[in-house]
Image (spheres, rainbow, N blue to C red):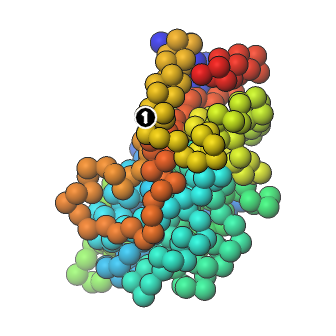
Amino acid sequence: MFKWPLINDNITQSDKEALSDFILNSNRFTNGPKVKEFEQAWSDWLGVKYTVMVGSGAAANYITTAIVRELKGQQGEIIVPPIGWVSDVSSVINTGFTPVFVDVDMNTMAISYENIKAAINENTKAIVMVHALGFNGLNDKIIELAKENDLILIEDCCEAHGADYNGVKVGAMSDMSCFSFYFGHHMTTIEGGTVCTNSEEIYQLARMFRSHGMTREASEEVQKRYHSEDLNPLFTFAVPGYNMRSTELNAVLGLEQIHRLDDNIDARKKNLDVWLKNLNSNKYFVDYLVDGSSNFALPLIINPQISSGNIPTEGAHQITMERICSVLEQEDVEYRIGTAGGGNQARQPYLKNYNFKTVGELSISNYIHDFGLYIGNHPELTEQQILQLCEKLNYV
């Protein structure tokens, strides 16, 4: 057990009591009224019209790309970031699209307007924007670019609960968005996630894709559209869906945790501020765009300008990375090399049997992959803990 783990135990005694009370006093545990109650609570918190609760953030990724296929056809390209999670890319592949990797900006870890624009062609169907580690990656230019080219814009906010752009929470500015409530994130339902949207059409599709494609999960209007005399209306399948439902237990836990979410987000923001202000900026990159960020973790990336204004040699980097990891291990701090998702997804072996593209160099993504890591950021951290670790790291 680490003294400084990636996440402290974020399921409280009151959470456990709420779950126990529900188990003892309920006869329904599969997707039902508590799921609907949480969906409404999450929509209200996020500022969107519709939320569909699913079994994980990865399930949300798969549903969003399945919806792209339903709305845009079965072939084409989807622009994706190299820095993200495997399901941001595997969902694209497994729903029949070609992932197109473009590089990220160092100060947001998100794909940039210029790189997205360079990758758009007549085959492009959608853009996946990942708010990696909780840094906001969206801006007006990217939102307008998607609209001008009739592209579906998907936000992956799994690490960015409560991040915002100009006062609007990430996840509320796109065609649809994904959230995760995995154990290590801003709040947890143990396993769980959501698809969020302001589109009635996308909402109905998400409900059906979540539950085998059955029309009975959608509105009466949708059910009438697919009505046929030779089909049982309870078992009419309008889309090739999945079973990605959540449970009432997950929803009960989410309804408890959401009351603490804003306070947890505030604590994480303060931690990041202390972290970046006290790391040695000559050794570590600290020039992130922190406005509106809500960080899942604390990034630790060697400053690319550490050697006379040039990226240093591989040997010098390797020694420094070894020393950084040694300090973290001596201080009993859990860490992950490569930052979000293990670094550059374009370098992962699962892609070798599938078609994918890169547009432009992935130099920043490769740099983050080779010379970056992150450590846990959780509300229980004290300022003194952060200051002491910064002091140790600054002597590397």
Q: Is residue 59 above or below residue 239?
A: above
> Residue at horizontal 22%, vertical 57%?
352
Asked which quadrant contains residue 136, the reply is bottom right
Q: Residue at x 56, y 29 (%)?
A: 375
Image location of residue 255, percent across then percent down: 62, 39
On screen, residue 301 above or below 229: above
Residue 257 image point, x, y percent: 64, 35
Amino acid carrying label 1: it is Gly
Quadrant location of residue 389? top right
Which residue carries the number 1 mark?
A: 315
Q: Residue at x 69, y 67 (%)?
A: 139
Q: Is residue 116 above or below residue 368?
A: below
**Quadrant holding the C terminus:** top right
Residue at point 31%, 79% (across, down): 74
| Element type where label 1 sits in the image | helix
Question: In the image, is 169 to the left or to the right of 74?
Answer: right
In depth, the one of 69 and 267 nearer the eye is: 267
Could you say where residue 37 lies in the image, as x and y percent from the top left? Answer: 61, 49
Foreground pick, 83 / 304: 304
Judge whether residue 116 can be spotted in this image: yes
Q: Is residue 9 visible?
A: no
Q: Nearer the viewer, residue 65 or 251?
A: 65
